[in-house]
Amino acid sequence: MTSIDGATGARTELSATSLENAAAKIANALRDEFDLEAGARVGLLLPLHWQRAAWCAGVWTAGCIVDLDADATSVDLFVTTIDDAAGATGPARRDVAVVSLHPFGLPLSEPLPDGSIDVTLAVRQQPDAYLFEPPSGDLSALTCAGRTMSQQEVLDLARTRAADWGLGTGGRLLASDDIDLIDGWLAAVAVPLVADASVVLARNIADADQLVGQERITARATSSG
C-alpha cells in the first residue's frame, strides 16, 4: 500500500505485514483500551490515507462496525483527525479519538480540543497479533447511507468493485479522493484484499493521471454511479 498527500508531499509505504500489524494493534486497543465488544459501532471520519485502511481493517478485525453515517453522539467511539475533532467534540458528546496523519503515525504535536484524546499511544502499545476471538463473516461490518452490510457482504461488494475496475491479482489500484464515499472506503483495504493486489491512496492530487505511469497503476477506482 502507498499513501500520498499532494498537499504536503507526504508519502508512506506499508507492506501487507505492516498493515496487518497495524490493524491488529487497533483491534486490540478497541477491545482492551476502549472496552468495545463485537458489534459496537465506530464512527470513522478519516481522509483517503493509510490510516483509513488501518482503522477500517482494525475495526473489522475486532468484529465492530465501521459507521460512515455517524457523528460523535451516536456511536460507541468516534475517530477522526485533529482538523475535524473540534467540530465533533462538545459537552454533550463522547470522547473523540484523534488519529495522527503523520507519514509514520507519530503522536500529535498540536494541542487537542477539549473532549478529545490522541489515540496513537493507546494503539502503539498493543501487540502486533490480535488477542481476542476472530470475527465471523455474518457480523455487521459497514453502515453507509442507511444500509448496513455484513463482513461477507462487504467482501462480496469488494469483489464486484475489483471486477468493475479491472483489478486483477498482483495489480495496482489507484484511488483518489474524487470517488463516491463507499467506494473510497472499499478501495482503501477491502478491494485490494480480495483481489490480492496493492493500492495507491492519493489525496489532494491536482492531476491523478500523472500518477498512473509513475506508480505503475493497472486499474483505477471510479465512482459506481
Image: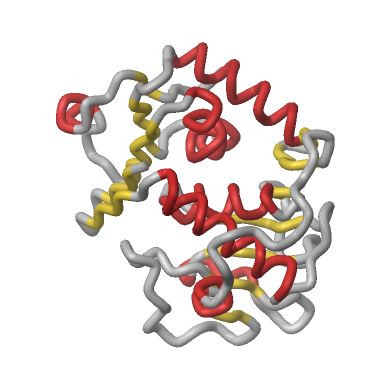
Instruction: Judge by depth and name the residue closer to the eye, 116 or 225.
Output: 116
Image quadrant for the N terminus? Answer: top left
Q: Residue at x 55, y 39 (%)?
A: 185
> Image check: 73 left or right of 118?
right
The quarter of the displayed image where residue 33 is located = bottom right
Look at the image and name its color scheme: secondary structure
Instruction: Judge by depth and name the residue closer to the eye, 135 or 188.
Output: 135
Q: Is 133 rendered above or below residue 126?
A: above
> Image check: 163 left or right of 199?
right
Q: Residue at x 34, y 37 (%)?
A: 200
Residue 86 appearing in the image? no
Count of numbered marks: 0
The quarter of the displayed image where residue 111 is located = bottom left
x then y, percent, for residue 181: 56, 37
Instruction: Judge by depth and name the residue closer to the eye, 25 or 204.
Output: 25
Residue 74 appearing in the image? yes
Q: Residue at x 52, y 32 (%)?
A: 193
Q: Residue at x 67, y 50 (%)?
A: 61
The quarter of the displayed image where residue 225 is located = top right
> Image check: 85 left or right of 204?
right
